[in-house]
Amino acid sequence: DLHSFPTRRSSDLNMTGEGNMKTLLKIELERAFKNKWFYITLCIELVLVIADVCTVALPARMAYEEFYIPVRDYQIPGAYCYWMVVNNGTVYRLFHFIFPLLISIPYVFTIYNDIKSNYVYNITSRIDKSRYYLSKLLTQFIVGTAVVAFALISSFVLTAAILPLEHPTKASAEYNISVTKAFPELFYNHTFVSVIVFIVLESVVFGIIGCIGFIFSYLLNNVIMVMLSSFIIYYMDFVLSNLCGRYGSLMTASKIGILHKAWVTGLVAELMIIAVTAVVVCIIRMKKKDIL
């Protein structure tokens, strides 16, 4: 039971005296990763990844007889070409629409519930408040990062299980990574390394975006709005960017594999705003006098 879980772990905090950061973070991570909603989120992602592989990679593999005709002068595409991060197909675009929802499901409700149930005051009366709030913020970041990383890693593994790992060339017209993108040299010269970089960077980007839920957990009294807060801000940024003629919104720029060079500065600036706001909220909560 997610609601009774904190009570069962209270003895852990008592044993640590001041409640060291490692113990607090361990407890919060267990609350995030050992609940059914985290696994439901991963199942949703896996279904979408399988749908992408079945509609993109599998048909390409079945059409290899055609690609092997000697008169063809273009490169035979493989896993690097049809991996969703490079291919930018329908499922990948859908992921980038719903990622802010998926990264909020496992843990944002826990943050909100701790506040409304006054559990937060029970804990901060016995341990250092700064460590408690920092552990909550770090946990939300880690959860958001893990949720996105799972989708991207499972996509690459399943795609590579069907298609060979080719060596991409710039002369081929099969790839979406042109010289206008942020990482063309890395992709064409060190392709597998670029896969790791794309996964890490994109996961971290959404880990930071997920911190929006942490911010609004302390600002709103409606659990639905708190759960949707990351998505609302994310989508509003997309709409306003298009209205203003600025296409490097979070929704478009967070596709790290095909990120345009011109969008890098804007993406970093927006992520810094979210991160700084989350830290400020965390500091305010640390300094606020608890009232039961």
Image (cartoon, rainbow, N blue to C red):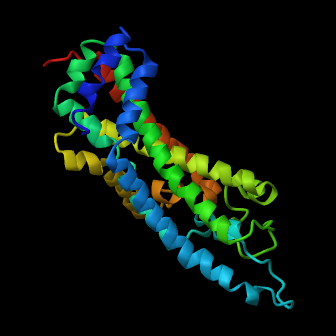
**129 relative to 4 in the view: left or right:** right
Marker count (numbered): 0
**Residue at the image point whose x is 36% and y is 58% from the top:** 235
Q: Residue furthest right?
A: 70
**43 relative to 63 in the view: left or right:** left
Q: Residue furthest top?
A: 17
Q: Nearer the viewer, residue 292 or 2?
A: 2
**Residue at the image point whose x is 21% and y is 20% from the top:** 121
* Above-or-below relation of 238 to 72: above
Quadrant occupied by the C terminus? top left
Residue 110's spot in the image, x, y percent? 28, 38
Residue 105 seen in the figure: no
Quadrant occupied by the N terminus? top left
**Residue at the image point whose x is 42% and y is 26% from the top:** 25
Q: Residue furthest left?
A: 292
**237 relative to 7 in the view: left or right:** right
Residue 142's spot in the image, x, y percent? 47, 38
Residue 119 location, quadrant: top left
Residue 179 location, quadrant: bottom right
Residue 178 seen in the figure: yes
Q: Nearer the viewer, residue 196 or 206?
A: 196
Residue 141's spot in the image, x, y percent? 44, 38
**81 relative to 270 in the view: left or right:** right
* Above-or-below relation of 72 to 226: below
* Above-or-below relation of 95 to 230: below
